[in-house]
Amino acid sequence: MKRRPATFALALTLLTAGCGDTVVDEPGPPADELRVEIVAEHPHDPSAFTQGLELDDGELFEGTGREGSSWVSARPLDAPTERTRVPLPDDMFGEGITVTDGVVWQLTWKDGVAFVRDRDSLTERRRIDYDGEGWGLCDQPDRLVMSDGSADLTFRDRDTFTELGRVTVHRNGRAMSNLNELECTDDGAVYANVWKTEEIVRIDPETGRVGATIDASALLDRLSDADRNDVDVLNGIAHIPGTDRFLVTGKLWPTLFEVRFVP
C-alpha cells in the first residue's frame, strides 16, 4: 500500500524518532482532552500480564507477556471461562495481538518473531522474523499497524509482515514515545496505551497527529487498595464494534472495564 507522503515538518522528526522532546512544527488546535466514563465492569484474570487485547465476533482475545508464562487466549466476552489458551515457548516474551483474515497475529518483545495462529484453535501456523522490538499491533483493512516503544508506528503487510512505511506520532508539537498496546477502529483511528502512564491517545495514522488524549486514571481508582498494590500498568484496549464503547484493562488487573471516552 502506498501511504500519503509526510509533510516536510513531520519528516524532520524521523531523524530523532522516539525522542519525547523532538519539536514538530505542527499547525492546528491542541489535542482534545477526554476522560473515561465507566459503563460496566467484567471479570479479568488477575494473573494476566496483558500485552494485547481484541474483541472479534463476540470473542475476547488476549495475549500476555513474561518469559515462562506468556500465552494467548480466547473466550466469549460474556463468559469468564476461556475457550482456548495456548502458551508461548518458555524463553519468549509475548506482546501485542490482532485478529485478521481468520488468523491471530502475536508479537514477541525482543525475540523478533511474529506468530501467525489459527483464529479458532490458536494453533501455530507459521512464524515470521522481524527486526527490532514488538509492542502493540492492530489491523486496518489494508495493513497492520505496529508499535515498538518509540514514537513510530510501522505499517506492515497483512500476509507477509513486510514493512510498508512508518509515521512518527506527535502531540501538541512534540514527538510522543512509549506507544504500547494498539487498537484500530473502523473510522481509521489508532488508539494507543502510553506505557507507564494512565493515558490513552487517539492517533491519525496518516499524519501521526494525536487528536485526543484520554485520562484513564479513574479506572485505577475503582480498584480496591489491596488490588492497587498488586497490579502493574494500564495496558489493553479493545473497541466493541458497532458501539462507542471500549474494553480497557491493565497488567495483572482483576477487572476489565467497559468505557466510553467523553469530554
Image (spheres, grey):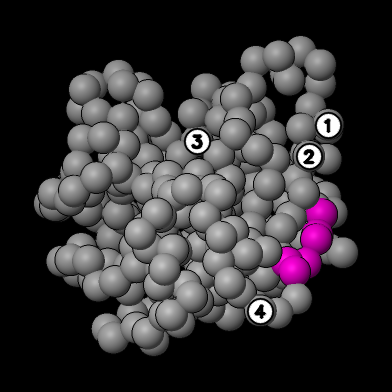
Q: Which one is in front, 224 or 103?
A: 224
**How far is mark 1 from mark 4, CA to CA?**
36 Å
Q: Label 2: which residue?
A: 217
| Above/below status of 46 relative to 152 | above
Q: Label 1: which residue?
A: 221
* Mark before the other along the chain sequence, 2 or 4: 4
Q: Which one is in front, 144 or 47?
A: 144
Q: Are marks 3 and 4 in contact (CB under 8 Å)?
A: no
Range of the magenta residues? 30-35
Can see residue 49? Answer: yes
| Above/below status of 95 relative to 7 | above
Q: Residue at x 31, y 55 (%)?
A: 104
Q: Label 4: which residue?
A: 27
Query: Where's residue 162, x and y in %?
Result: 18, 66
Q: Label 3 amino acid? A: Thr
**How far is mark 2 from mark 1, CA to CA?**
7 Å
